Each structure stands twice: as C-alpha cells, then as structure tokens.
Amino acid sequence: MFNSTCSTNRVQLAQGAAAQRRAELYLGVNGLRALIKDKKALAVAGFASIGGFLYGYQQGVLGGSFTKPSFQMKFPKTTEAEVQSLLTAILQIGGYIGSLTAGLFGEVYSRKHTILSGALWVILGSFLCAGAKDLAFLYSGRFFTGIGVGTLAGIGFLYNAELAPPEFRGLLVAMQQFGVTFGIMVAYWIGYGTNFIGGTGLGQKYLAWQLPWMIQGIPAIILAIGTFLMPYSPRLLVNKGRYAEATTTLSFLRNLPEDHELIQIELLEIKAEAIFNRRILERRYPRLVKEGGSIWIAELMGYANLFRSLDSFKRTAIAGIIMFFQQWTGIDSIIYYAPFIFQNLGLSSNSVSLLATGVVGVIMVLASMLSMVLIDKLGRKPLWIASCTGMGLSMLIVGIITAKFSANWTAHTAGGWTAVVFIWIYIANFAYGAGPVSWTLISEIFPLSTRTKGTAIGATSNWANTIVVAYSVPPMIKHIGFGTYILFAVINVLSIIFMYLFVPETKGKTLEEMDLVFGSHASKEEMALLADIQREVGLTSLLESVLYAKRSTEENKENNSSGLA
C-alpha cells in the first residue's frame, strides 16, 4: 500500500511539475486564448477537424436528397422505405469497418497517412454519388464514403489530442466534435438552397441533388492535400524509436528550441508512456513479445486485454452500452431522415420540410457549444439524466400527437407544427447532453493501458448500433407510425435508469478514484510501473532539477529583497 501510494505521488509530482512549467510558458493563459496564441497547433487542428466536418456533412446530405423530385425521378425506388434504409445503413457498415481499422492502421503506419486514406475514400464516394447512373453507383459511393468518415472519426480525435499541449487539448478535441455538428448544419442548409435549382417541382434539375455531393468532396480534397503539410504525431515517432524526429516535431509545434526544458520534459513523458505500454504487453503476453510477434498481432492483443478480468469487462460493457443508448435514444433517425420525418408530421411541402431540417442543424450547433460549458461544471451523470429526460418527454409528446392527428394532418396543422417544435427540443437536449457525454465517458472509464482500445470499442459500438437504427427507422415509421416515437421515449427512460445505477460520475475523478468505484487496483499497479519508468528514462530527475533550480531562484530573490529592506 505504501509503495503504490508513493508511486502514485511520484507520478502526480511529475505531472504537476510539467504542468507548472507549461503554465509559466503560456503565462497562465489556457483554453481558447492559448490556442489562438499557438498558431501552428491551431492550423493543424483546423485541418484535422475537417474530418469531423465530413462525418457530420454526410449525415445530413442524404435525407435532403430523398425528398427532392429530381432525385426521385432519377432513382424511383428511393421512395421505398427499404431502399432508403439500405442506402443509409450501407454507409454505416462502411463506417464500422473504417472505425474498426483506423486505430490499427494509425499504429502500424501513421496517423496522418490514415487521415489521408480516409479523405481519399470520401473523395471517391462523394463523386460516385454525384455522378451516379443507377442505384449501384449510389450504394458503392455511400459505402466508400462510410469507410472514409469512419476512418476519419476513428483517428481524428486521437491525432488532435496527441499534437496539442495539455493547456488546450480538451478544446481541440471539442473542435472535432463541433466540426461534426457544423457539418450537419451545413449539409442541411445546402440541401435547402439547392432544392430551388430548376424549381421545386417536376422541372427540378439533377444538379439539385448532385451539387451537395460534389460539395462534400471539396473539403475532403483540401484535407487530403493538407496531410502532406501536417506533421507526424510525436507519440507515433517515439513508438517507432525515431526520437530525433519527435524532438524536431515537438520543437516545431511548440515554437521552442529543441533543447528547451519543456520540449525535453514532453519528449520524456511520451517516451515513458510508450515504454509503459510495451511493458504492459510484455507482462500479459510474454511469449508474443519474446518470439518477436508481428505488430498486427500485438495490437489485436491489446483489445483482448479489455476482457481479461471482470473489472475490464465491466468497463468495456459500460462503454458499449452507453453507445447503444446514445443511438437508440433516436438521434440518428432524426439526423438522417429529418426531411422525411417532417413530411410525415404534416409538412407536405418539400421546401418547408427542408427548412425545418435546417433549423435542426442550427439548434445542434448552438446546443453543442453549450455542452462545452456545462459538461465540466454539472458533471456527466446529471447532464445525461437531464438530457434523456428532455428527449424522452419530447418523443412521448411527438408520439401522442402523431397517434391523434396523423390520419389527417391537413386538418390539424397546429398539431403538426407542435410535433416539429418538440423534435427541435429533442435535438437541443441531445446536443448539450447525451451526445458529448457519451464520447467523454468512454474515454474516461478505462485505465491507462487500455484507454485507446476501450475507446475504440465504444466507437465501434456506436457504428454498429447506427447500422441497425438507420436500416430500421423508415420501415418502423411506415408500419408502426407513432409507436416509433414511443419506443424511443421508453429507451430514453431505460438509459436514465442504467446511467443512475451502473455508471460512475467521472467529473474530476482520478484513475485511483475510478478504481475504487469499480473495485479494482489496476491503476495503482500501473502507476507504480509508470513511476519506475519515469525514473528510468530520466524524467523524474529532470523535473526535480527544474524544481530545485526554481526554488533556488525564488530563495535568492527573497534574500535579495530582505537585504535591500
């Protein structure tokens, strides 16, 4: 107990001393002000966040096409619920594959080359859809786009987090999430604007549905070109033993000379964590490491660690179930099929349904900005419970209104608009709560050695459930109507019960405190190992010398002041 406590204290001392030196460098400035000060990090993060924009854009682009007369004339079968489901779900299947492989490719090759591959898949998919001659082209284009955005979603958050200094790392990751909601909004409003190309009736031009897909390819092209200017992740370079390149990259990103103590501290922090992960693998799979197994097998064994003990399985299960609930609250049914849903709520005019859909995008952007303020103040659980309460009540009201008035919306226009307003309220509740909370939680509940892989499992659960939701919703609306909304309301209630009973509050909790919640000692053991490695690579002695020099300087200042007095 004493040794593990001392080890934890040594690790915290190292982290605290490094944080203090960084704070001095940034003159106490953090968050957005620090990001604006660091132009290089801002530029790199902006480029990487294009991936988030593309992920959001593709969510909004298809639903707007379904309701356009020119699209229906070109592809008559897309008016069928089953075809709409398949066109939506096939992108999710591609996204599942891209998300599942992004982490592996990012480790084996590089983060930025994996981003490049994702951008190229999106370019191919976008222009296959824009130039589609028949449904086969659309299916292929959507599948390839899915691989691309799944890859970008899987690697973009990691790349941003690894390149950013801690003072605004959270903000850069939030930029990626903001890019998603901004992409959805842009797709909705482009869909609304292009609806008027050639009129809104049978004379509508094909360009009305082609142009949104052409536009989707443009930021993907910019991102692909930008990857040649983006640096390699310093963490990846250290993992591959390329320490000189890692030092040069950190020096470039931080605008500091290579021999600056802050560059040396950060390099040793990265080096210690890389050795730590390798030692954990050696402990758990000694034969694999001893026999020089391939990197592919080593990475796959990292996923096996998630199921080695009851504690690990519980955390993995929570990550998967959280993402199950995030999808089955009904969010992607609204995002993907918003124009179709609004038409089914009595907005018979395509232009009006697209306009209502555009409002959805604006609400998502504004509410997601609110989440950045609330999530660290109120905590994860209160925000989730409040969010799902609002979503559940909204879905219940929409279901009741639909049950009463769907037989004759023309005679009940006010009822239809009331349902639309509660869809908007539903969206706001998701964007400030369940959306950001789910992604935050899955990155916090795992110990250091399994955090990357555990987060990846949560992400793939998200994609897997999105596939089912995307394929199920049009037939559900067609066959059970108001029952679709009642089902989502019930699932929101179940998610509140699950969150209250089984998920710990992670706001402000250390890894050791999380272990107490799960009845585990994994992180204490890992902290002891990490402390030994920090001492081994020289990080501990470097920080001690920095702190000693600082204390000496302060003492000399005090002595000089006393002498003058």
Image (cartoon, helix red, strand yellow):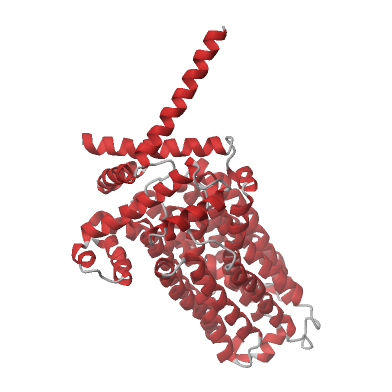
How far across and how far down the image is residue 331, in percent?
53, 65
Please give left or right for residue 303 compared with residue 175 in the image: left
Image point (35%, 39%), residue name: 540
Residue at the bottom extreme, as displayed: 133
User: Foreground residue, 292 or 456?
Assistant: 292
Quadrant occupied by the N terminus: top left
The x and y percentages for residue 466 are: 47, 71
Q: Is residue 479 visible?
A: no
On screen, residue 142 above or below 511? below
Q: Is residue 559 left or right of residue 525?
A: right
At horizontal 52% and vertical 74% (from top left) the residue drawn is 117
Horizontal arrangement in the rendering, residue 278 relative to residue 385 (left or right): left
Q: Is residue 254 visible to the viewer in this orientation of the structure? A: yes
84 vs 41: above or below? below
Residue at screen point 58% across, 57% down: 45
Determine the image quadrant of residue 453. Answer: bottom left
Q: Which of the 4 image quarters holds residue 450?
A: bottom left
Quadrant occupied by the C terminus: top right
Q: Is residue 445 above or below residue 337?
A: above
Residue 16 placed where, x, y %?
42, 36
Point 51% across, 83% down: residue: 86
Q: As rendered, which of 148 and 274 lies closer to the eye?
A: 274
Where residue 316 sits in the image (x, y, percent)? 33, 59
